[in-house]
Amino acid sequence: MTEPLVPRMREFGETIFAEMSALATATGSINLGQGFPDGDGPGAMLDAAVEAIRSGGNQYPPGPGVPELREAVAAQRLERYGLSYDPMSEVYVTVGATEGIAASVLALAGPGDEVIVFEPYYDSYAAVIALAGAVRRPVMLRPVEGRFTFDPDELRAAVGPRTKAVLVNSPHNPAGTVFTRGELEAIAAVCREHDLVAITDEVYEYLTFDDTEHIPLATLDGMRERTVSVSSAGKTFSATGWKTGWVTAPARYVRAVQTVKQFLTYAVSAPYQRAAAYALSNEIAWVAELRKSLQAKRDRLVTGLEAAGFTAYRPQGTYFVQADIRPLGFSDGLELARALPAKAGVVAIPTQVFYDHVEAGAHFVRFAFCKKDEVIDEAVERLRRLA
Ligand code: PMP
Ligand code: GLN
């Protein structure tokens, strides 16, 4: 039988998140793989979704999103970052950040164009770049003194005549890095010099720790006009299943994204948009508490992983820890991740699947800490058996 899948998608099997969550379910393991919290978002936000359904808001919403969410997003960008967007022409609601990124890449990069990504990169980037017929150009993030960063020379060297866009994820999944102003300046300089568009993935914009601040790339000199910013409600409000996201960009970019997005899904689930609008406008204090609680969970998991024998990288943002498995005598994270349920009753994500240069990530696995303290403690207890 011939393979029905189009050739450009053949390198992509089932996502690692699906594989590892299924493994967790099948083996009854503690799932520190796929990143989703084991608690709900703010109660009043949940009520707002119920109320939206009960009050008859169940038909197609406007394709660009319900006005109250577009207004709430514009207000949030302005209040938090000083970035001004017109809610009607410069904000567009998408099915999670995933669709926002996909529509942006499909709208802005065509066959043979190149898109720069920082590896390890979130898995959907590679797939949508391939869907667009474009080519990914990875720039490596390497640990330097406990934090993953890139070499600006390597970034400059990655730019060629076909480069169209740079995909920038900060806070970064899976590395846990929050790009500094200096790192963002290096990216901005390359974008300005080579007339590139930046697509930013800011889904962890609120989940930064200690005194680390998330700086949107669009706030840098000359960048608002060439940046398509993407974010979503999933991580901020612990509602990853709601799949409600948004794009903010200059109107001409939003029109480009719209042209693609309207034929992918047309519109986004109406009740969740209303609830997300409510949350953005009323629940930022709740998010501040979430962030505090996640910081403590981060430290709890890092301490536990170190006690279990891993070298753990304390992230500045997101809810993931990179763990080097070599001190425990392992060298292949994919092998270990597949064996971990049997060995320890825990599931992790092998970081190597997010690399083109697999060897650079082979010895890392990623653990999520957006879980109840007792779940983290039990996972750590089990991981201690590995030593
Ligand atoms: N980007 C990154 C870096 C992520 O970790 C995730 C997972 N939440 C997404 C995008 C997808 O976000 P959403 O669920 O809003 O589509
Ligand atoms: N963003 C989540 C993570 O990195 C997974 C989302 C998904 O399952 N696609 O764990």
Image (tube, rainbow, N blue to C red):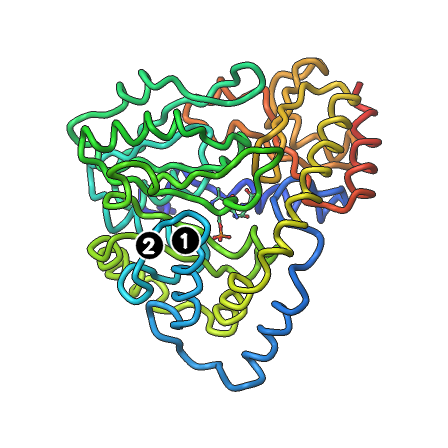
Assess whether mark 1 and mark 2 are in contact (beta carbons under 8 angstroms): yes
Element assignment for label 2: loop
- Which corner quadrant of the image does residue 70 belong to? bottom left
Which amino acid is tagged 1? Arg
Q: Position of residue 62 (x, y in %)?
A: 35, 74
Q: Quadrant of residue 368?
A: top right
Q: Nearer the viewer, residue 296 or 366?
A: 296
Q: Find residue 71 and report its horizontal and vertical position in percent.
A: 40, 66
- Foreground residue among 317 and 138: 317
Quadrant placement of the C terminus: top right
Looking at the rendered structure, the kind of residue marked 2 is Ser
Asked which secondary structure carries label 1, the reply is: helix
| x and y, in percent, of residue 187 in the image | 32, 29
Q: Residues within 10 Å of mark 2 (few under 14, many from 20)?
A: some
**Quarter for ligand 2?**
top right
State the CA–CA distance, disc 2 to disc 1.
7 Å
| Sooner in the amino-acid sequence: mark 2 or mark 1 | 1
Percent position of residue 311, x then y:
67, 18
For residue 77, which numbered disc appears in the image? Answer: 1
Say which mark, if any, is on residue 84. 2
